């Protein structure tokens, strides 16, 4: 028996030795990472600029659910949510000797700001913009409006470098971003991006035909989202995009009926978006309602609004009067005007007013940025949808604004959005009639002094 045991053990030892693999790498993983980082550093710290395509992470209910709300969703608990729901943005950066100089389309000017950065090794070679920079940390700001900021990143893991482009992954969000060698004039580029962004404001899109299927396009210009809805509203793809010098480019390709959409370009006169090969085109539908610095007003009284619109206002008013110390009320008008935006110098804004019951002149305002978006329809009507930026869903405590003690006032804004889309009739320079397509008994005037 001992003899057999000895032979068996010898045979196993032979097998073990015979199948031992040689080491693939001559260096440890940590050494390889350090070497990669040193190589990346030499490439990054040249004398030119890099274009950072930046996607902050926000996971939100689809913007098109309000006011669209297709019947496929039984309750608000079924409303779909989407990542990167505030779109992508362009930053230009220069890296040298531990300093980063940055400018961006989201700034009001093309001014640059310099701060420090570091190289690090986390899950891989990492760029860390860990000292304050108001440009690079634009989506990291914490404020009463954004108590949890808006999903900005400081650490970017370098995944690879090829064709003059670094592929990055946000360490917090896992969103994929790129850092591409930039050629051209920095200020000219930023101005062009802002120009193209402005060209999308107040715009909706006409349907397109994809492989014999009609596809509805829902555009959210300010937060850079485009949704494809088809097959009788049963299928939908919401895709974030970034503004380019030619038009828009999606975070990742959208595939419908075997057709892949990577980007859309403006046509020559900027009246439509077309695919890069020109095979599919969608015309812009411009909102009949546009705002300026000259304010317009919606007043909820019998001369300017229907009973249903007034009832909508009264529900919000009662909610305000029941809140907190019960000493406040909601004034019966809404102000519409351009405001300084979070991500652009001028954007449309919607504003309501809460006042002390015993002193109506002592007011505070609750406001949001918004889009009026033109809506394609088969009735040859001028129709619009109201899309409100950062509007919380009912019962959602995450987002608060400067009047977060009176969240009930926001119900009026949300109710207006949900009652859309609206038919618009422009009577003259002062009065525009707005009627709910869903319920013609709900209407109001927009008055511009």
Image (spheres, rainbow, N blue to C red):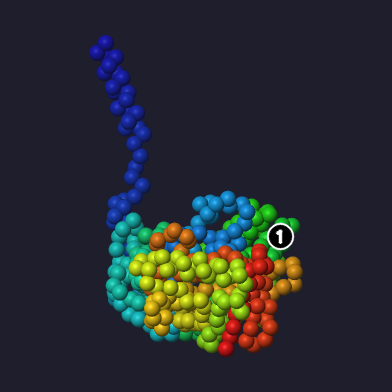
Q: Quadrant of residue 127?
A: bottom left
Residue 105 image point, x, y percent: 46, 78
The N terminus sits in image quarter: top left
Name the residue carrying label 1. Answer: 214
The residue at 61%/70% (across/down) is: 307
Q: In the rendered picture of this protein, how many numbered marks are placed on residues?
A: 1
On the picture, is 237 further left or further right than 331?
A: right
Residue 442 image point, x, y percent: 63, 69
The C terminus sits in image quarter: bottom right
Can you name the residue that lies furthest to the top here? Answer: 1
User: Does residue 286 appear in the picture of this structure?
Assistant: no
On the picture, is 419 further left or further right than 213?
A: left
On the picture, is 429 further left or further right than 295?
A: right
Residue 371 image point, x, y percent: 55, 74
Q: Quadrant of residue 173?
A: bottom left
The foreground one among 192 and 384 is 384
Residue 437 image point, x, y percent: 67, 67
The foreground one among 284 and 417 is 417
The foreground one among 382 and 199 is 382
The residue at 32%/25% (across/down) is: 12
């Amino acid at each position: 028996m001992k003899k057999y045991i000895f032979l068996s053990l010898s045979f196993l030892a032979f097998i073990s030795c015979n199948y031992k693999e040689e080491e693939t790498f001559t260096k440890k993983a940590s050494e390889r990472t350090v070497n990669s980082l040193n190589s990346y550093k030499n490439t990054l710290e040249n004398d030119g600029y890099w274009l950072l395509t930046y996607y902050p992470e926000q996971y939100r209910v689809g913007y098109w659910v309000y006011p669209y709300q297709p019947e496929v969703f039984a309750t608000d608990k079924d409303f779909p949510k989407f990542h990167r729901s505030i779109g992508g943005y362009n930053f230009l950066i220069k890296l040298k000797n531990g300093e980063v100089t940055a400018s961006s389309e989201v700034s009001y000017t093309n001014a640059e700001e310099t701060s420090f950065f570091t190289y690090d090794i986390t899950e891989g070679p990492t760029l860390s913009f860990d000292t304050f920079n108001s440009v690079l940390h634009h989506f990291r700001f914490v404020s009463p409006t954004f108590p949890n900021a808006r999903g900005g990143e400081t650490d970017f893991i370098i995944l690879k470098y090829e064709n003059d482009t670094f592929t990055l992954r946000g360490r917090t969000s896992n969103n994929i971003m790129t850092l591409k060698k930039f050629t051209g004039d920095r200020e000219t580029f930023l101005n062009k991006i802002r120009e193209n962004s402005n060209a999308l404001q107040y715009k909706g899109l006409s349907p397109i035909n994809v492989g014999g299927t009609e596809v509805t396009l829902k555009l959210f210009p300010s937060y850079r989202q485009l949704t494809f809805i088809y097959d009788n509203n049963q299928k939908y793809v919401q895709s974030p995009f970034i503004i380019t010098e030619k038009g828009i480019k999606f975070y990742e390709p959208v595939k419908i009926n075997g057709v892949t959409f990577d980007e859309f370009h403006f046509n020559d006169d900027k009246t439509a978006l077309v695919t890069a090969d020109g095979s599919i085109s969608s015309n812009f539908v411009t909102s009949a309602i546009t705002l300026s610095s000259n304010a317009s007003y919606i007043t909820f009284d019998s001369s300017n609004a229907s009973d249903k619109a007034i009832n909508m206002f009264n529900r919000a008013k009662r909610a305000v009067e029941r809140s907190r110390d019960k000493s406040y009320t909601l004034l019966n008008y809404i102000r519409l005007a351009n405001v300084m935006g979070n991500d652009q110098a001028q954007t449309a804004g919607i504003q309501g007013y809460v006042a002390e019951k015993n002193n109506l002149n002592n007011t505070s305002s609750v406001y949001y940025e918004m889009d009026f978006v033109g809506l394609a329809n088969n009735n040859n009507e001028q129709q619009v949808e109201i899309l409100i930026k950062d509007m919380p869903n009912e019962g959602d405590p995450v987002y608060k604004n400067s009047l977060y003690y009176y969240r009930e006032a926001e119900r009026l804004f949300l109710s207006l959005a949900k009652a859309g889309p609206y038919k618009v009739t422009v009577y003259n320079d002062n009065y525009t009639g707005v009627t709910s397509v869903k319920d013609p008994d709900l209407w109001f005037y927009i008055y511009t002094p």
